[in-house]
Image: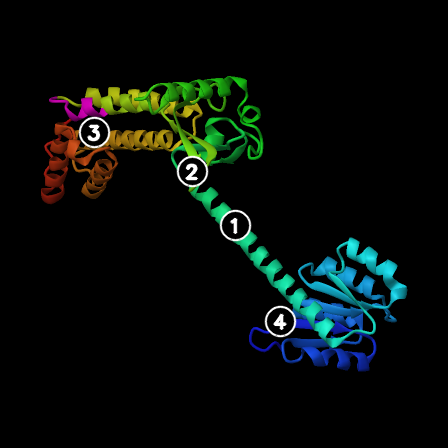
Amino acid sequence: MAEGNRARILIVDDEEAILETMSFPFEDDYDVLTSSSPVDALEFLEREGPVAAVISDQRMPEMTGVEFLAQVFERHPSIVRIILTGFADMDAIIRAINDGHVYAYITKPWEPDDLKQVVRRAGEHHDLAMENERLVTDLMDAKVLLEAVMDQLDTSALAVDAGGVVQAVNKPARSYLGLDQRAEGRKLEDVLGPEVLQKIGGAAVQIGREDDCSYQEVDLSGGDGVRLRVAMHPLTSPDGRELGQVILGREISHEPLARRFEEIIERLASQEGELRGPLADARTELSSLSDQVKGTGVSSPGMSELAERTSRTLTAIEYWLTVDDSLAHEDFPEAQPLLDRMRVATSRWPSADRLPPRVRELAQRVEAYYETGENPKQPIL
């Protein structure tokens, strides 16, 4: 077992006396493990996990040290591998070093101080390798996290370096620009294609030319034929070096449709007098608007929100008309379902403080009917 944070080293030699002799110089600084069989040593590593370094003799009955360390390298590449050898084995050792299977070799007979020095350097090498692996893992985790955050943005973002190579693209950008393959590491012109590149490039030139111009609106034929409000922002390092730029795009294809939606709502909210006809007309208009939203093929937060608001408003209108019909044509409709429908409809209307006047009257009639059970059988809307 390892003591505290002491590094573990594994010594492998088929001679027990050699194992004892080699273990002694390291016992004060390391947790020393020994094995007289390279096969058993491999099984130990599989069972107990890797160690910082393995020191192996070259000449052993079951397999040579080079063969053993090659398997260690294949299964546990983070372990630093050291071999003990005589001059007669140098060709095999040199090949192993060149293949990356062996970090260092020590010739027999060895000096304890020299052996300790090699193992100390091996331990430092292992620590650096582990730290580097941790940093790479942290960097990859941070990259995944950053990409996940970028993908949640409403705005599309495409970052290019100073050489025009794409370094990052978020999910909205891939959707709006119709990118069906990975763009990172490729030239911007290869990613966007000449037509889209020309439009975005033209927007960039216009933004740079006019002092009071921070964005340009661009119609794209790529992707879903989306319309974007494009802005450019330079990317610089803390010391002021130019790193590239990020191209930001906000989807505005939904804005004309959203204005139509608001016009319909405002017309109903301000409608005085009879409301049934205007509600039926609005239902037809909103159904058509819903079909248009779906027909754009644009996937964006703005378009999704508009689709949801349209659907909720249609539900509100249907419920109001149904409740009004029930009160006008039935002697004693069930009061609770009417009350529930009115509450649901109010919650789905885009603005609770902008209810049409006749709808407010209908709500009062339902409340009164719920309390008294009296129904004059007269339409309100």
**Where is mark 1, residue-wise?**
139
The residue carrying mark 2 is 240
Disc assigned to residue 291: none
Report if residue 50 is visible in the image: no
- Residue 325: mark: 3
Mark toward the viewer: 3 or 1: 1
Q: Quadrant of the C terminus?
A: top left
Earlier in the chain: of badge 4 and badge 2, it is 4
Kind of residue at disc 1: Leu
Residue 140 to residue 221: above or below: below
Q: Which residues are magenta?
A: 265-273
**Residue at (76, 58) in percent of width and height:** 101
Residue 60 location, quadrant: bottom right
Q: Earlier in the sequence, mark 3 or mark 2?
A: 2
- Mark 2: which secondary structure? loop
Mark 3: amino acid: Asp
Instruction: Please tell me the numbered disc located at residue 7.
Output: 4
Query: At numbered mark 1, what does the secondary structure look like: helix, strand or loop?
Result: helix
Tell me which colouring the rendered structure shows.
rainbow
Residue 260 in the magenta stretch? The answer is no
Q: CA distance from mark 4 to mark 3?
A: 83 Å
| Position of residue 221 measured from the top left corner of the image (x, y, whole percent) | 48, 18
Most foreground residue, 163 or 262: 163
Q: Secondary structure at mark 3?
A: helix
Query: Mark 4–mark 2 contact, CB under 8 Å?
Result: no
* Residue 138 place in picture, x, y as percent: 52, 53
